Image (cartoon, coloured by chain):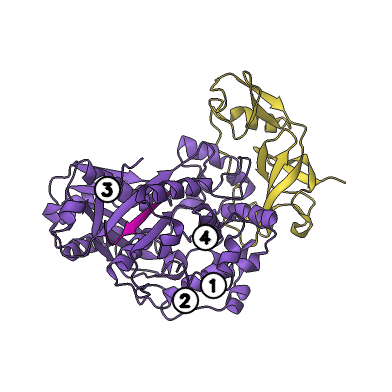
Amino acid sequence: MNSTKNKAAIVGIAITDFSKDCQRTELYMACRCIKAALDDAGLRPEDVDGLVKQTNDATDEHAVTSSMGMGNLTYFGECRWGAAPSAMIMRAAMGVAAGVANYIVVYRAVNGSSRRRMIPSMRASGQMSTSDSLQWTFHAPFGHLSDAGQVAMIVRRYMHEFGLNNDQFGWVPIVCREHGARNPNGMFYEKPITFKDYLKSKMVIEPLRRMDYYEEADAAAALVVTTTERAKDLRQRPAYVLSAAQDMLAETEELTSYYRPLISGIPEMGKVGSRIFAMAGVAPKDINCVQLDDSYGPFVPMQLEELGFCDRGEGVAFCNKGDRIKMGGELPLNTSGGSLGEGYIHGMNHVVEAVRQIRGTSTAQVKDADLVLVASGAGGPASGLILGGSR
Amino acid sequence: MSMQYDTEHPVPMPPILWDNMGFWEGIKRHELVFQKCKECGIWLHPPRPVCPNCRSFEKEWVPSTGKGTIYSWVTYLESPHPSFKAPYSVVLVELDEGVRLVSNMVDTKPEEISIGMPVELVFDDITEGLTLPKFRKVG
């Protein structure tokens, strides 16, 4: 299955700053970012003929198109859930590879902090689709209404099966904050944390502490995707999409896959990993750094296991003390800070950072980074991709 | 300790649709029932329009013994909704029939809960219109 192998490249990137209240609409944020990403690539809005957005994004394609004075769009579509970011790049790569469009903008604008996402109220009020209703009917009346709580159920079982305690999850947020502390654009610039800070972090939904999950932010990101051929004529060094994949299984629910035989893993991510490594023709040991889904810190060790960076049950040991996953280690993690150390825009910043690593422009640059893996959507449908500096 | 509700705020009602109606009708008459496939006989939860094992659309609602063990659990120290008073625990119970159900504990403190702990079904009549299947420790 080589459908997305080396057909496309990311040629433009932009990201706004992360704030608690940007005082702007999401449409404004999206347009600012798309314009900046096109400038970065050396393209004009009228060159754009494709758009890929995230389903929950508050901006519609037509509003973006008419605001920006884009060309004739011949391709537009959406990707859902936390699994969207890598999948959106995959969809754009498919679009240019098939010749349906030439220059596709992938964007995400979310005022997640100032315009509270509606999840708890929406779930509580029962205004949802049939399939969401069938999922929530067994959670909402029991007070199982928060995404962190739903994840905590999986985390508790993971701890039980591998003899872990929740203090051991501290190293992922500590490393993400350490990397985020180097990123002036993020919410935690020059604000690293220690293990002591982690232990003091408020227990919100046991076994998860506040520092175990994302920081809501107002921010937007945009990326421009075109074919590998067209990429050569543009302004930046292309980040080649060596492979991209998404995965969903019969038992997959968004964050509450509680009803399958084993719940202490993320099998969807395992499937994504096998495919993106095979398609790119590389192995975990070849990867220079990773941008993993750290919406919930304890899912990082589980992703390391599923993606083959360590054995099953060894993810927490891999992250212990942070030495292997921080700058200078064998596999630096979330070098812009990720959802824990930069801000939460549902993983789109992870893709932008992967491109920066390939270009050599990160604030935590891994020397000679040539292969970067991105994973999106831990704990539900999953996607991932491998970017390369050469084809 | 049991789940405490703030009656000033309505408890989120379970969305009831054609596909899961049998479950909630059972609960209303104080009976825990699960879907069972009439063709291949597997227990199904959450309910589905079709059996994912044999793709039969013929199912029946069959009573559970209500006995099981704790498969996993969490404790909300902050409440995501004003009707639920924190702290409270949410448990994932594995019933003897093999299906798992999200629920709450009654007469049990969070620190008493552990994985593998045997539990049994009780019905909690929360309001006139809402009964929920809950669990307490055995013995």
What residue occupies the far right of the structure in this picture? Answer: B139
Q: Label 1: chain?
A: A
Which region of the structure is painted magenta?
A383-390
Mark closest to the chain's N terminus, 4 or 3: 3
Overall secondary structure of the magenta stretch?
Answer: strand
Residue that carries the numbered disc 1 in the rendered image: A322
Mark 3 lies on residue: A92
State which chain is coloured purple. Answer: A
How busy is the neighbourhood of tag 4: few (under 14 within 10 Å), some, or many (20 plus)? Answer: many
Q: Residues within 10 Å of mark 1 (few under 14, many from 20)?
A: many
Q: Position of residue A100 (x, y in %)?
A: 19, 41
Let me know if marks 2 and 3 both belong to one chain. yes
Tell me the shade of chain B. yellow
Report whether A354 appears left or right of B34: left
Picture residue at 14% right of the left edge, 52% below the top = A70
Q: CA distance from mark 2 to mark 3?
A: 32 Å
Task: Name the front one of labels 2 and 1.
Answer: 1
Q: Quadrant of the N terminus of chain A?
A: top left
Q: Residues within 10 Å of mark 3 (few under 14, many from 20)?
A: many
The quarter of the image holding the C terminus of chain A is: bottom left
Identify the image quadrant of residue A258. Answer: top right
Residue A90 position, x and y percent, is 32, 48
Q: CA distance from mark 4 to mark 1?
A: 12 Å
SS of the residue under disc 4? helix
